[in-house]
Image (cartoon, rainbow, N blue to C red):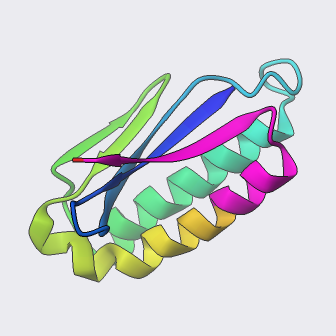
Amino acid sequence: MIQFDFLITADGELTGFSISGHSGFAEIGEDIICAAVSSAAYMAVNTVTEVLNVTPLTLRAEEDMLLKLERRDVKVCHDVLEGLKIHLLGLEEQYKDNIRVEYVEV
């Protein structure tokens, strides 16, 4: 199962996300759910770093992915992360056995 955690502040602002796991829907390399999650996450990261020119506090993209923003950059990245959240919640609704979206206070 893919675990997708949105990182939030105590007042509910999105400050990043982390992804781990494999959906188990199909073989690695042929899994449409993993592809959808990866594509959406990379688009969000690329928008934050290349379009908005924000340097994340933490950015890791290996077997898992982690994006953590500086507090000062949360507002400028808000719409990107909200769009990602809507997309991921839709995937979770469609594929309940393969992806879990949660919120982790940081």
Q: Nearer the viewer, residue 26 or 54?
A: 26
Quarter holding the N terminus is top right
Q: Residue at x 70, y 38 (%)?
A: 99
Q: Residue at x 27, y 81 (%)?
A: 76
Q: Nearer the viewer, residue 99 or 81?
A: 99
Give above or below for 32 relative to 91: above
Give above or below for 102 relative to 21: below
Q: Quadrant of residue 29?
A: top right
Q: Nearer the viewer, residue 95 or 72?
A: 95
Outermost residue to the top: 27
Q: Quadrant of residue 86?
A: bottom right
Image position, residue 74 (x, y; %): 23, 72
Image position, residue 92 (x, y; %): 73, 50
Residue 89 belongs to magenta span: yes
Q: Is residue 31 left or right of residue 6?
A: right
Q: Is residue 102 left or right of residue 70?
A: right
Give above or below for 46 relative to 60: below
Residue 36 belongs to magenta span: no
Q: Nearer the viewer, residue 25 or 101?
A: 101
Q: How many marks?
A: 0
Give above or below for 18 relative to 86: above
Q: Is residue 7 left or right of residue 88?
A: left
Q: Residue at x 84, y 44 (%)?
A: 95
Q: Residue at x 54, y 41 (%)?
A: 4
Q: What's the magenta region? A: 88-105
